[in-house]
Amino acid sequence: MRPQQPASPPCGLLASCSLPAGWWLSAAILALTVLIRGWQWGDPNYHIDEGFYLLVGDRMRHGALPYVDLWDRKPFGLFLIYWAVAAIGGASAGAVQLAAGASAAATAIVLARVARRWVADRVALLVAVTYLAALEALAGGGGQTPVFYNLAIAAMAAWSLRARDAPDQAQRTRAAVAAALCGGLALTIKPTCLPECIVLGGFIAAQLARHRASVRGAVARIALIAAIGVLPSLACVAYFVAIGHGADYLFATVVSATRRLPPSIDERVALARYLVPRLAPLGLMAAAGVALLYRTDRGDAAWLVAWIGAAITGFLMVPNFYDHYALPLLPSLCVAAAPLFARPVTGAIFAAIVAGWALLLAGWPAIERTQRSRAAMARATDLILANSGGRSLYVFDGPPSLYTLTRAPLPTRWVFPEHLSTSEERDAIGVAPLDELAAILRRHPAVIVAADGNGPRHFSLAAHRLIRVVLATRYRRVASVYLPDVAGGRRVGIFALRAAAASPAPRARATPLRSAAAPRS
């Protein structure tokens, strides 16, 4: 039988305060979010991904359409978030990081409230702090997709428990609908959360079936609620079909992911070695927490094991791996560790070990790195503006946020550098990357940014040979700038078109609306 939720003892002035119970928990989590994440706010190059998402969101404000004018495979929900951030925050990195921080804090609050099912408020706070700290060790200090959809999944988990505890069928149904909507919204941000939606939804379906006299009625209600969960994704598809780009949307968000080349076995082993130190402490404590919970509530322990297993399945769905792909594992692992964190004396020590280790791996607080990054990006922006004359910029290998900072017209709709510069994307983007790269270079961008060296892993040897030949014959190196980021950073060269090599064709119009001369597949 599930134990009663421990009550938080009143103390001092708080005993007579009329604020709702647990208010201090949310306030403490908000303060800790600022403390843990605040050092990187305002960094325009924290991570290449969020710089690209912000670029798409910013250009959407001026009429650009994802998958048509700027290509990527993330679902439409993510770009709607970044469109809203750009509209409210003026396309600034600080706005992204503030929105991501708010989402991380809200997720931590939800996880803490779920943990209060078994532990006291002070222990739930340790769960929240562990989540916030663990994000940092996996490049989650900015606006990566899981930072946003973890909130929806955590809320779905909370509603699934509410459905289990509901005293009547009406409240159980309302909780089920809320959970389905949360899961549906998460799917519009990244579909790898599908296993979690299925498992959490399955628990809810079991509760609805258990308390329904008619099997037919239970099936009908479950099907209706599942349809509500699918509705946000269907709405995205319907929108693109209605404007004549349904095939573009489905290819980008569904088909393209199946055509990427997977990493080799050696790479997977190396990446596993990188990941294990970042997740092993939390994973071990989550296992211990589930074992402790199993002694008192086997049903909740089984729910936690299923949720963790679903999160792991979602992680393994993507054969390619980056550290931030493991961020969806954190919510279920942190909640599962709650019973261990509740142990007298040792529980707080265990939580401190996990959080401290994560922050140590993240180099927290990396104030100096943020300052160097802001200065370096400002210098790179000034150099590009001084040499572009309002004409197009091409970032072959570097942060896409340079497009946003310079307001340069885009030379192609494949502006995320790795889509054209790596071998793993050669069959996955709808065009031949080398042909598209050659077409870009024939249009003579005024400035090209290319990393010194080979750039990203899986770099395309043919693409790098082509860019080096063109840079050597038509461009001059203006400067070399080291651009720090959360992964360590890299040095890029900024190359300006020589006057004699300029094309006699008219200049591309300096507008953020449509990509200049961007062919469609």
Image: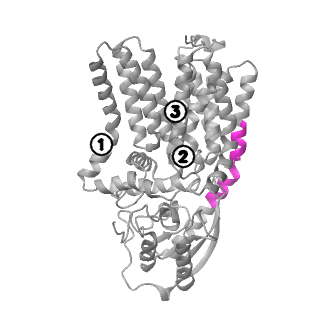
x 30%, y 42%: residue: 234
Measured as percent of width and height from the top left, residue 431 is found at: 39, 67
Q: In this view, does 341 lie above or below 456?
A: above
| Residue assigned mark 1 | 235
Question: Is the stretch drawn in magenta largely helix, strand or loop?
Answer: helix
SS at badge 2:
helix
User: Which image quadrant for residue 369?
Assistant: bottom right
Against 305, is 237 above or below? below
Task: Work out how far the residue at label 1 is from the one at label 3, CA to CA, in angstroms.
Answer: 26 Å
Residue highlighted by disc 3: 106
Q: What residue type is labelled 3?
A: Ala
Amino acid found under the numbered disc labelled 2: Gln
Q: In which quarter of the image is the N terminus?
A: top right
Q: Nearer the viewer, mark 1 or mark 2?
A: 1
What whole-number distance in Å separates the C-alpha atoms at marks 3 and 2? 14 Å
Q: Quadrant of residue 35?
A: top right
Q: Residue 104 carries which label?
A: none
- Is label 3 in a helix, a strand or a loop? helix
Q: How many labels does the image show?
A: 3
Residue in the foreground of this view, choosing between 104 and 342: 342
Q: Specify few, some or many for label 3: CA neighbours under 10 Å numbering under 14, 14-19, or 20 or more.
A: many
Say if residue 273 shows up in the picture: yes
| Residue 360 part of the magenta-drawn span | yes
In this rendering, the label closer to the viewer, 1 or 3: 1
Residues in magenta? Answer: 356-375
Query: Is 68 placed above or below 183 here?
Result: below
